[in-house]
Amino acid sequence: MKKKEVPQDKSNLESANFRELCYAVDENGEYTTERSSGWEPKTVALNNAIEEIKERIQDAKNRVITGETSPIEYYMELHKMDVGILASYVGFWQWKVKRHFKPSVFKKLSDKTLNKYAETFDISVEELQNIK
Amino acid sequence: MEIDFTHHQSAHCENGVVSNLMKHNGFSVSEPMVFGVGSGLLFCYIPLLKVNHAPVITYRALPGHIFKKFAKRTGVKMKREKFSNPKDAKARLDENLKKNNPVGLQVGVYNLLYFPDEYRFHFNAHNMVVYGKQDDRYLISDPVMEEVTSLSEKELEKVRFAKGAFAPKGHMYYPISFPEKLELETAIVKGIKDTCKAMLAPVSFVGVKGIHKIAALIRKWPKKKGIKTANHYLGQVVRMQEEIGTGGGGFRYIYAAFLQEAGKLLGNEKLIELSKEMTEIGDLWRDFALEASRIYKNRSAQTDSYNKVADQLDHIADLEKVFFRKLKKAI
C-alpha cells in the first residue's frame, strides 16, 4: 500500500475522535506510517456485526415477552456476551446458566443468584426481573 | 505522580507496549522490529472456537507470545505477575508507579470506556501502559490511541479483571534488566526462522495450509450455513484481518516494514527485495477484503462470488508458500 492510498473513509472511529495507524510505503519505497480515519470494507463488516447483535437482542427480548426465555438471556445478548462469557462472569457452569434461561427456573432463583447476575450486568435485581 | 513517559501511537497494542517500554528505557526499537523479532506474523484458523458466533482466525501469534519471544531473543528480562485478588493487583501497580516504573497491563476491551462503543467486544488480550496516577485516576498510554488517556480506579480494575477467554487476571509486566548492548542481528535471524517455520508448518489449520483451509470453508459456507451466516462469517474474517491493530493487510505491511528495516541493519539486499514482495502480498489481502465486502454489502450474493474470493485466498496462499521458502533461504 502506498502512503497516499491509505484510505480516509468515514467510519465509527470518528465518534471517539481518533484515527488508527497504518503502515505504507512513501514515494521512495521507504516504509512509513500514516493515520487512517477508516476503510469502507471493514466499516461495512463492523456495521453488519452490530446489526446482527441488535437482531439477537430483539429476538431475545421477544422471547422473554412470550415467556420462552428469562431476562438473563436478553441481558446476556445486550452485553454482547455468549453463554461461556456470562458463565465465567457469574462463576457458574454453562449448563447452569442455560438452566436459568428457563422462566420457571428463573422465577425460583435465590436473591444471591439474582444479585450475581444483576451485578454482572450492572443493573438492580428489580431491573433484571422486569425488562423494559 | 506522573512518570516522564513518551506515548507513541502504534498499529498493534502488544508491539506498541513493548516498543514504548523499550524506548522509555533508552533503547530505540521500532514497532515492526518488535513484531518481527517476536515472530508476530501468523495465519491460524482456530477450529471449534467461536467468537461473536463466528469462526475465529488470527493473523498474529497468540497474545503474549510476541512479547515473550522478543524479550528472550534480545536478552531483556521481564517480570510478569498475575493476581487472584484485585486489591493485591492494585497495590502492586501503585508500588511500581511510586518507584517511577511504568508497567504494561493486559486488559479486556469491553469496559474500556474511551473506545467507541462499536469496538467494545469481549476481547481480553489488549495491552496498555500505566505511567502515573493523578487524583485517583490512572494515566494510560494505550498504544492504538493517538493521545494518552486516563481511567478511574474502578474502571481500571474492571478491565484488568475481565472474564472469559484469555482472562487477564490482573496481568502486569515490565522489564527488569537489559543487556549492555541490544544485539538485534541474531534476534532478527531467530525471529525470521521461527516465522517461516510457523507459516510453512505441516498442520492443516496453520500458516499457508490454514489459508487454503479457510478458502475451502468459504466455498462451503453459503450452501452449508445459508447466505446470512456465510456473510456474517466472511465479515468476521475481514474484521480479524483489518480491524484496529493489524496496520493493514493482516499484519503483512508491518512485516514488510520489519523486513526492510532488518535488511538495512544486516546489510542484506535480499530482505529488502522480499520486503517489496511482502507489500505486494499485503495488497492482495486488501483486494480480498474489498471483494469480500462487496459480497456482504449487498447481502444477496451468488455462490460464484464466494468461490471468487476463495480463489483469491488460494492464490495468496500459493504466493506466501513461495515467499516464506525464499525468506528462509535469505538469512
Image: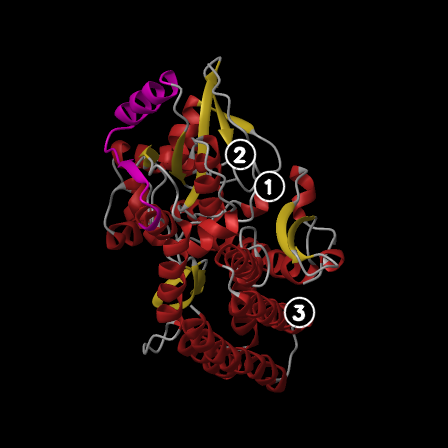
Residue tagged 3? B290
- Using the image as rendered, state which of residue B62 and residue B50 is in the foreground: B62
Quadrant for residue B130, please give it: top left
| Apparent side of residue B119 relative to residue B76 in the rendered image (left or right) | right
Q: Is residue B184 above or below residue A90?
A: below
Residue tagged 2? B113
Q: Position of residue A17 (x, y in %)?
A: 68, 38
**Can I make out residue A84 in this image?**
yes
Asked whether disc 1 touches disc 2, contact meaning CB atoms under 8 Å apart, the reply is no
At a point 64% along the width and 79% down the height, the residue shown is B301
Q: Is residue B301 magenta?
A: no
In the picture as drawn, the residue positioned furthest to the front comes out as B267
- Using the image as rendered, state which of residue A52 and residue B255 is in the foreground: B255
Q: Residues within 10 Å of mark 1 (few under 14, many from 20)?
A: some
Magenta-tinted stretch: B73-99
At label 2, the amino acid type is Leu
Q: Residues within 10 Å of mark 2 (few under 14, many from 20)?
A: few
Residue tagged 1? B116
